[in-house]
Amino acid sequence: AGHMAIRKARQGKKGIGKNQSDTYYFDIELCKRCPFKEGCYKEGAKNKTYSMKIKSGEHTEQMAF
């Protein structure tokens, strides 16, 4: 869904011990017409965002193990 985002922001400082997160901002007018809006878009919403945590290198290695 990142390709439909109008803006992407990274939050959190790098290298502090807490994971950063990417936040995607979506245009509500596109969400109203989207065929996959069921369970995603809430009627009357003023904005739409989606955040996902960026795993550090140690976490990624542990998940692969």
Image (tube, rainbow, N blue to C red):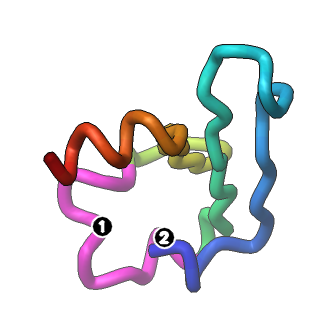
According to the picture, the residue beneath numbered tag 2 turns out to be: 31
Q: Which mark is residue 37?
A: 1
Question: Which image quadrant is residue 6 in?
Answer: bottom right
Kind of residue indicated by mark 2: Cys
Quadrant where the N terminus sits is: bottom left
In this picture, which residue range is highlighted in magenta? 30-41
| Residue 19, x across and y down, in percent | 60, 27
Prevailing secondary structure of the magenta residues? loop
Residues tagged 2 and 1 counted as in contact (Cβ below 8 A)? yes
Residue at point 76%, 61% (across, down): 8
The residue furthest left is: 65
42 left or right, relative to 45: left
Q: Secondary structure at mark 1?
A: loop
| Residue 38, x across and y down, in percent | 20, 62
Q: Earlier in the sequence, mark 2 or mark 1?
A: 2
| Residue 35, x across and y down, in percent | 27, 84
Kind of residue indicated by mark 1: Lys
28 left or right, relative to 6: left
- Along the viewing direction, whichever of 4 and 53 lies nearer the viewer: 53
The residue furthest right is: 13
Residue at point 40%, 47% (across, down): 43
27 left or right, relative to 30: right
Q: Secondary structure at mark 2?
A: helix
- Whether 8 is drawn above or below 20: the answer is below
Residue at point 57%, 81% (across, down): 4
